[in-house]
Image (cartoon, grey):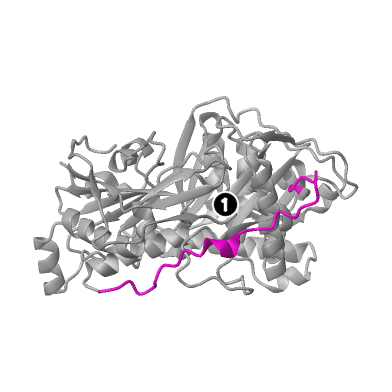
């Protein structure tokens, strides 16, 4: 249990760009305009006091105030990322726009009367505690609301946290990382960010050329075009069961699915209990064991198909295992179908035209795998990882990416959502963002980085793979899995995750 503490918060101030910036109204891409991305994503970065042995750097860290250092760096960064100092809103036709007016970024200074070690550097810390180190700044003004807010909190040990709230409509994880690195570079004395930010959201605007009346959720219908039994509905603030539309082209279906009735599985626990949030540690040895067991299982089934000429990746084996654990924990109806949407970045995939290096808008699509719950629960789990691998390949070509964005444009204009009842969920991998290793404001790299649960896809439909906390050397090379589930399901899910270390073999054939 964490040590009780008090936080002293000062009044919020608006940090403006250090120099005059353009006054203009900017539009957004098709992906940015997905209404389900229109939320403030809150992430906490944790920095220890004086982690370096370098005397000059140590002297700087001892004398400098992180609140002032980051405040100054923010002001300088807003000269380049000036849209973040403006106001965001939806215009009369429902499209997003941002008014670049130099209004500034809400910035809060706070002090906590405890050491970071007493909170275990926020590794496994209760979500309610973490939420005290970030804040929201809602606005009911017709001019819109702030897309970015920051809270910097000092601790008695000399360490500090940076709590950043950033609109997902404006940046994806990669874009947020570009901005955060730019602040750190400017704080270290550089005159300019190493990567110049680029807006150019028109590059990813789709053509909305889907046939009239065709749902963009082709992965739910069967080969025979059986009437879809999912519920398509108009946009609703209360709808929490959304399936990302970008997935319509990156689908991979199990053989059992192709002959099944196209209904989504229901869950008896999905909305029956309060939501719990937990971060599960999967160490490097457990990941190696999973990969080995999956490969052995494939060999035992005589599966030497083309997709298995490549070894399973960490994302593929973890996503497969988490997917099965999730449907068991939620007690999904075995006769229904379940959908996994894996967020896939397109910055390196898109070639015509390519995205500029400094593009900081949303640039991802979804690779989708679909399976009946019964076969997912009882069938060979290596086939699930194989399906995920194939779904990633299905969205790797330039033409497929463009068609997917066109499909989403039709979806956005049609204002449609899918009520999946918990049958569909999203996995996103933050490990490649390298936010905890490469962002140094003068106190060394962050010891931890943790996203606080967002009300995206109804909480329980979003799973995030994270790098390990650097204060835990036993987790080097491992992965943390951030999960939100109804209380009635969390205990079962925890049992499934604990079982990774207890995988058994039977006559040389392993069973996951």
Q: Nearer the viewer, residue 376 or 284?
A: 376
Please report the residue visible at 37 percent of the width from the left and 36 percent of the height from the top: 139
Residue farthest top in this picture: 272
Q: Main secondary structure of the magenta part?
A: loop
Q: How many marks?
A: 1
User: Which residue range is magenta in the image?
Assistant: 191-217
Residue farthest front in this picture: 23
Q: Position of residue 200 (x, y in %)?
A: 51, 65
At label 1, counting other C-alpha atoms closer than 10 Å, the crowd grade (few under 14, some 14-19, many 20 or more) is many
Q: Is residue 289 left or right of residue 359?
A: right
Q: Nearer the viewer, residue 31 or 69?
A: 31
Quadrant that contains the N terminus: top left
Residue 124 visible in this rendered orientation of the protein: yes
Q: Is residue 35 left or right of residue 331?
A: left
Please report the residue visible at 64 percent of the width from the left and 70 percent of the height from the top: 311
Residue 509 visible in this rendered orientation of the protein: no
Q: Nearer the viewer, residue 444 or 457?
A: 457
Q: Quadrant of residue 227?
A: top right
Instruction: Report the residue marked by disc 1.
Output: 427
Q: Is residue 379 left or right of residue 287?
A: right
Q: Secondary structure at mark 1?
A: strand
Residue 54 lies in the magenta stretch: no
């Amino acid at each position: 249990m964490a040590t009780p503490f008090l936080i002293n918060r000062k009044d919020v101030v608006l940090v403006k760009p250090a120099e005059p910036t353009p006054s203009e109204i900017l539009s957004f891409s098709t992906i940015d305009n997905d209404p389900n991305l229109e939320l403030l994503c809150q992430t906490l970065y944790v920095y220890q006091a004086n982690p370096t042995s370098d005397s000059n750097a140590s002297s700087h860290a001892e004398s400098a105030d992180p609140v002032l250092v980051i405040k100054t760096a923010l002001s300088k960064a807003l000269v380049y990322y000036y849209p973040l100092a403006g106001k965001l809103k939806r215009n009369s036709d429902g499209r997003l726009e941002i008014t670049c007016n130099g209004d500034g970024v809400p910035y809060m200074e706070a002090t906590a009367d405890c050491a970071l070690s007493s909170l275990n550097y926020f590794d496994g810390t209760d979500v309610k505690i973490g939420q005290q180190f970030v804040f929201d700044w809602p606005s009911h003004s017709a001019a819109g609301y702030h897309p970015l807010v920051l809270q910097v909190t000092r601790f008695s040990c000399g360490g500090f946290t940076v709590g950043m709230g950033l609109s997902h409509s404006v940046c994806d994880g990669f874009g947020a990382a570009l901005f955060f690195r730019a602040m750190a570079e400017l704080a270290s004395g550089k005159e300019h960010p190493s990567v110049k930010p680029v807006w150019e959201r028109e590059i990813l605007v789709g053509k909305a050329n889907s046939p009239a009346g065709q749902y963009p959720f082709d992965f739910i219908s069967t080969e025979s075009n059986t009437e879809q039994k999912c519920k398509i509905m108009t946009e609703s603030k209360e709808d929490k069961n959304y399936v990302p539309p970008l997935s319509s082209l990156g689908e991979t279906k199990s053989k059992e699915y192709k002959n099944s009735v196209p209904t989504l599985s229901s869950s008896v626990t999905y909305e029956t209990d309060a939501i719990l949030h937990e971060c599960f540690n999967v160490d490097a040895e457990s990941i190696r064991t999973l990969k080995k067991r999956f490969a052995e299982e494939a060999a035992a089934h005589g599966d030497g198909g083309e997709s298995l000429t490549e070894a399973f990746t960490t994302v593929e084996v973890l996503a497969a295992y988490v997917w099965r654990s999730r449907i068991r924990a939620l007690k999904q109806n075995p006769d229904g179908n379940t959908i996994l949407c894996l967020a896939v970045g397109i910055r390196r995939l898109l070639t015509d035209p390519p995205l500029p290096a400094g593009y900081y808008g949303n640039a991802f699509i979804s690779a989708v795998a679909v399976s009946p719950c019964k076969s997912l629960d009882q069938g060979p789990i290596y086939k699930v990882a194989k399906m995920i691998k194939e779904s990633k390949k299905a969205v790797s070509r330039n033409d497929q990416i463009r068609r997917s964005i066109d499909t989403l444009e039709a979806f956005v204009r049609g204002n449609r959502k899918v009520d999946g009842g918990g049958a569909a969920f999203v996995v996103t991998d933050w490990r490649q963002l390298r936010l905890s290793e490469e962002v140094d404001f003068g106190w060394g790299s962050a010891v931890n980085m943790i996203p606080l649960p967002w009300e995206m896809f109804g909480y329980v439909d979003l799973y995030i793979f994270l790098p390990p906390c650097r204060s835990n050397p036993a987790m080097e090379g491992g992965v943390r899995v951030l999960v939100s589930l109804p209380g009635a399901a969390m205990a079962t899910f925890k049992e499934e995750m604990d079982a990774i270390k207890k995988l058994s073999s039977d006559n040389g054939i392993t069973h996951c």
